[in-house]
Image (cartoon, rainbow, N blue to C red):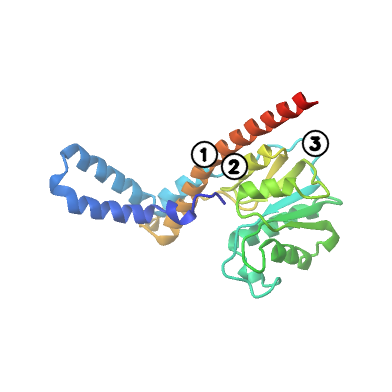
Amino acid sequence: MSTFPLYATSPLPYALALLVALAAAWRWLPGWLRGVGIAAEILLVVLTTPLGANALARMASLRTIPACAAPQPTTVVVLGGGFEYAPRSSEDFGALHLATLERVFAGVALWRRLPDAHLVFAGGAGWTIRESLPMANLAIALGVPADAIRIEDRSRTTWQNARNVAALSPRVPRRIWLVTSAMHLPRALGAFRAWGFEPCAWPSNRPHRLQVWPGAFIPQGGAAATAGAAFHELIGRVEYAVLAWWHRHHAAAAHSTDSLRQ
């Protein structure tokens, strides 16, 4: 995830707030500002419909998987997607969010295609039990040997996923398969590249489809959540671009300082 909270990116509360503001101040607003307000309100409402939300989600998703140069990596890094509720045990797989389950299943399916591959589960969401532990236990239940699995259980954001996986000992190979959802992949790839990895993308699901049916034009809670997740990713990419620039700048400065000392 990004450090920008997911709940703050849904268009629904902004649509409601703008509607109330327009109604309260309508008589005092100049004509041009009324027009701007109405246009913004229409856009926000459209983004709470399945058609508008899916269009935004497709914009945020990785739709074309870049080819992975040979030889293919033999390490599969799977990123967590959070919990639905606090797990009762490290084998309470139902507590894992649907996105997390999809990523585990996709990671295990990829592992089966790669001889002698290793799985790394990254994610520190949770309290007493961190998400990477039930993710790993689910992979074991699906037939992955325990000695083929490593976990990183301290990270709370995608940027920390990349940083902490890079710091694991023994060292994780720089060339990896990176498994996460299609919408999350562009930001995740950027974070892992910033920390020195050469990731090959492996989406755990398909981008949202643009389907037209009568219900596609009706505002829905699920659509508002989808649009919020898409905005979260788009804002997060800007944030991570700044973090990557800062990281490169300070890494280069540290390298120059070390060279002068030698």
Amino acid under disc 1: Val
The mark tally for this picture is 3
Element marked by disc 1:
helix
Element marked by disc 2:
helix
Pick whichever of labels 2 and 1 is earlier in the sequence: 2
How many residues crowd around disc 3 within 10 Å: few (fewer than 14), some, or many (20 or more)?
few
Element marked by disc 3:
loop
Residue 30 seen anywhere in this rendered image of the structure = yes
Vertical position of residue 138 compared to residue 231: above or below: below
How many residues crowd around disc 2 within 10 Å: few (fewer than 14), some, or many (20 or more)?
some
Question: Tag on residue 70?
Answer: 3
Judged left or right of residue 258, residue 20 is: left
Q: Disc 1 designates what residue?
A: 238
State which mark lies toward you, 1 or 3.
1
**Residue 154 x %, y %:** 68, 57
State which mark lies toward you, 3 or 2.
2
Q: Within the image, what quadrant is residue 188 found in?
A: top right
Amino acid under disc 3: Ala
Pick whichever of labels 3 and 2 is earlier in the sequence: 3
Q: Residue at x 45, y 52 (%)?
A: 228
Circles 2, 1 touching at the beta carbon (< 8 Å): no
Q: Residue furthest left?
A: 27
- C-alpha gap between disc 1 and disc 3: 31 Å
Q: Nearer the viewer, residue 176 or 154?
A: 154
State which mark lies toward you, 2 or 1.
1
Q: Nearer the viewer, residue 188 or 2?
A: 2
Vertical position of residue 182 compared to residue 86: above or below: above
Amino acid under disc 2: Pro
- C-alpha gap between disc 3 and disc 2: 21 Å
Q: Residue at x 64, y 49 (%)?
A: 160
Q: Disc 2 designates what residue?
A: 186
